Image (tube, grey):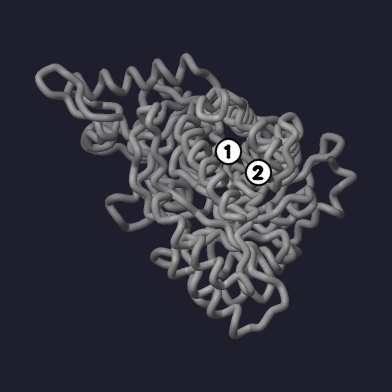
Amino acid sequence: MFKFTPKLNQESRNIIENREQLKELVNCYGSPLNILFPNVMNKNISDFKEILKKHNLSGKIYYAHKCNKSNSFLKQALQNQINVDVASLEELKSALSNGFTGDRIEATGPKNDEFIILGIRHNIVFNVDNLEEIKKINYFKEKIQTKNKIRVLLRLNGFKSEETKIINRSSRFGTPKSQVNKLITYVQENDKNLEIIGISFHLDTVNAKEKILAIENCIEIFEEMFEQGLNPYVLDIGGGFKVNYIESKEEWNESISELKESILSGKNDLTWNNTSFGLRAEKGVLKGILNIHDYYNEITGNKLLDEILSSRLTKFQNREIGEILSENMIELYIEPGCSLLDGAGVNISKVNFVKENENGDYLVGLDMKRSDLLIGEQEMFVDPILISDSKEESNGKGVFFIGNLCMENDIIFKRKIFTDKIPQSGDLVAFANTAGYFMDFDQSHTIKQKVATKVVATFENGKTIFYMDENYEPLKCLKEE
């Protein structure tokens, strides 16, 4: 059977299995509805801290604010004594208003003048993308006349290896490694205002080998900087520590194989309008690359960080990365997003209608739009959970979930979903583990549709206690943990 059963933690089960409570919440707050479990962050954060401790590393964890707009996650991060990575002026304002001070904030991403100015006023760390940006930071530092030097990390790209064959994709972020001396020279010429505290990268990949290659390149740059009399002490390796969304490896592999077989057959009755996700059949041969994320992962979060830090570099006497950083007193900064929110939220939507199309396929209209759940054209290969009173068995007949926009392309999933029952109007549908990016990264008010209300759920002695996201305060809820 073509299924991608989601992996559920206890918090998600507590919510999804209480059908009447969910109905009341949707009646009260509307559809779509986002339900958050900020307490889940506690263990995820603790797990990362344990890996730093295992490798005898000092460092900082920066929660990537961009992965969710919620205030409650920021407050939970603050309560856990970690820091925050902000990628825009509004994210910086959000972090400050939720209690973070400048010494616990790092600015990444493209920065306009207002972002830079507010960051300087609060003495945050700047993860610098390019020479023009660092010149702007220096210019505004001169105008504002703050006492402290501005701490900067130099964000680099273009990492290469003579030994490891890895496809090196171009990145729009950072300065090529070959041009790092331009940044260093500029900072040295303006050292009354600027201080290089280290170097950084953030790769658009979850591939450990690519991260290890980047770290090796960065350690070489550290050596060059030490020889120049500089004293950098931070290596920031960004995020991308993976999450496992799927319950069964066997089911994942079998379902992906079934999708490929369907495309190869030419019938492709598993997807909307023959969507093939980058694959194509040519003369009985399947060609192309399946362009989807790996939603099943075995090594995730803190375990992936451990694997990276335990990797040995032949250029450095085959020593472990963690050992090299520790011996050189280099602090490790990381910027996890999804992995800190693993299991920390679900999306809920109401079924507006069910109809059949000309092919006899069921179309299930949800009271949400695609952008309430997904980023761009990305497809989510994690099945939704139907919460239904329907008595009509599906008998293996799949359905397509469609959105509430008056646009032809508002298809929630471009693949069939196989549920035990045929959905009916008024049913609810739950999407598991969506707090990291899926929930609100692309949310919009298109055709004046509402965006999802965020509600926090905490659990104590078998009871569920709800808060509006903006009213949640972890200090008041300590007794609930």
Is residue 74 rendered to the left or right of residue 184?
right
- Extreme-bottom residue of the structure: 143
Q: Where is residue 154 in the image (x, y as percent from the top left)?
A: 53, 56
Q: Which mark is residue 294?
A: none
- The three-letter amino acid code for the residue at tag 2 is Leu
- The three-letter amino acid code for the residue at tag 1 is Asn
Please determine whether, in this image, residue 239 is positioned above or below residue 250: below
Which residue position is annotated with label 1?
433
Question: In the figure, residue 83 lies in which quadrant?
Answer: bottom right
Q: In the image, what residue occupies the spot 57% across and 57% down?
A: 153
Q: Position of residue 86 (x, y in %)?
A: 59, 60
Q: Is mark 1 on a helix, strand or loop?
A: loop
Q: Which of 320 and 402 is in front in this view?
A: 320
Q: Which of 243 and 82 is in front in this view?
A: 82
Q: In which quarter of the image is the C terminus?
A: top right
Q: Position of residue 34 (x, y in %)?
A: 60, 50
Q: Is mark 2 on a helix, strand or loop?
A: strand
Which residue position is annotated with label 2?
332
Question: In the figure, residue 449 lies in which quadrant?
Answer: bottom left
Please determine whether, in this image, residue 116 is positioned above or below residue 456: below
Q: Which of 179 and 425 is in front in this view?
A: 179
Please determine whether, in this image, residue 103 is positioned above or below residue 426: below
- Asked if residue 68 shows in the view, the reply is yes
Is residue 203 rendered to the left or right of residue 320?
left
Q: In the image, what residue occupies the spot 31% across and 30% down?
A: 290
Q: In the image, what residue occupies the spot 86% across and 43% down?
A: 480
What distance separates the C-alpha of mark 1 from that of mark 2?
Answer: 28 Å
